[in-house]
Image (spheres, rainbow, N blue to C red):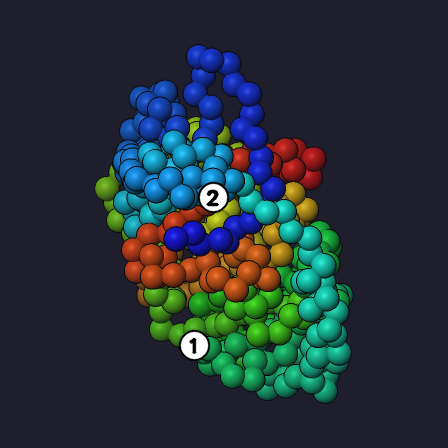
Amino acid sequence: MLNSTGLEKRREPPAQPAHEVAPRILNLPEMVAALSDEDQERFDRIFSVSEVSGALAAPEAMHDWIRGYFGSVEAVANQQIIKVTNRVSWEGALYNELRARRPLEVRGTADLDRVIAETRNDPFCHPLDGTPADTFGRVQGKHSITASNVAKYDGSHGIVIFDEHHPLALTRERVRDYIDTAWKWGQKAHAADPSASYFFFMWNCVWKAAASLVHGHTQMTLTRDMHYSKVEFLRRQAAAYCAQYAANYFDDLHAVHRALQLGFAWRNVSVAVSLTPVKERETLLIASSLNDNLKDAIFTVLDTFVKQFGVTSFNVAIQMPPIGPAAEDWSGFPVLARIVDRGDPMNRTGDIGAMELYAASVIGTDPFFVAEALDAAFQEA
Ligand SMILES: [Zn+2]
């Protein structure tokens, strides 16, 4: 059955000369074959791609419905599926042509706007008496203030509460301020508990992305002893890659995306639309530090998601080396920001099921279209 998430206006693929392979995920095997030997070798170190078609026989009675939904019966009778696996991070994605091409309803945001308006005057609208402070106090930003999370994920768990209720009222200056405020909180929390030095930044925008309050906010934690399991796993895998190939994994990951026109550099930030996204439109931003260019790049990705793709629910995470000294080797590990679209909040179907939790992610958007839109947006940024 259909998992009806990831609604978007359909984008037509760009016109291509007949001799060129159109940049589309279903053409990935041909696109890889057209790369230089060096780029192909780098691609093969990191990725594995396999292609299969799925067939079915639809009863006559379904034909009208199928034509209405997918354009033609033939398109459904034989479906092309591409499976991409990252052999380093062991993230995987399954792309189905039908999911990428199915006509999607264009929805307004009126229902969401109504919910956002109805939730005004929540505790985050008056944080000083609606939320607890950390024992070391609050960090005051220009557009935000921190609170201590009531029910903590970890020993140090704070919230950056925006001074604007509407969670999608984003500007470059605001996004910088939210991240700066979170980082200052991290420094203070680390000073209060020097044994907690692994900082994690997360932003869950509305309930579809697991936010408990609609009011705009981000969260951050500091953990002890070792980084969170997914970050530590990535560090270990990247270190093993470096030992095997004498190359930085993150540099090579970006180079592969760049060679396929899924990535580009903007100032000193490497942008890549992931070939193995955790869910729709996952975009990776790689930088050497948590600098202003990285913060601005996060804003540009979010702004493009919201304005061009109609995204209203997303997650942002920042995975980075610890604040203080650590027993393990973090050399070569960058500051990695990851941004993912979580689908339509007014759709009751969840976007993450047993496949995503335990097998590989099922993806309905073409990363090449996302990269094209981001490339244009960054050129104007
Ligand atoms: Zn509010």
Q: Is residue 34 visible?
A: yes
- Number of residue marks: 2
> Amino acid type of disc 2?
Trp
Vertically, is 206 above or below 196? above
Q: Residue at 65% of width from left, 43% of height from top?
A: 308
Q: Residue at 30% of width from left, 50% of height from top?
A: 90
> Amino acid type of disc 1?
Ser
Vertically, is 25 above or below 174? above
Circle 2/circle 1 CB separation < 8 Å:
no
Percent position (x, y) of residue 267? 60, 38
| Residue lying furthest left | 244
Q: Residue at 66% of width from left, 84% of height from top?
A: 131
| Label 2 crowd bin: few (<14), some (14–19), many (20+), radius 10 Å | few
Q: Is residue 282 visible?
A: no
Q: Secondary structure at mark 1?
A: loop
| Label 1 crowd bin: few (<14), some (14–19), many (20+), radius 10 Å | some
Percent position (x, y) of residue 139? 67, 74
Please state which of the two labelled residues, at mark 2 or mark 1, is closer to the viewer.
2
Q: Residue at 39% of width from left, 53% of height from top?
A: 1
What mark, if any, has residue 65 been given in the picture?
Answer: 2
What mark, if any, has residue 195 been given in the picture?
Answer: 1
Percent position (x, y) of residue 223? 43, 73
Q: Secondary structure at mark 2?
A: helix
Quadrant assignment, res 10 = top right
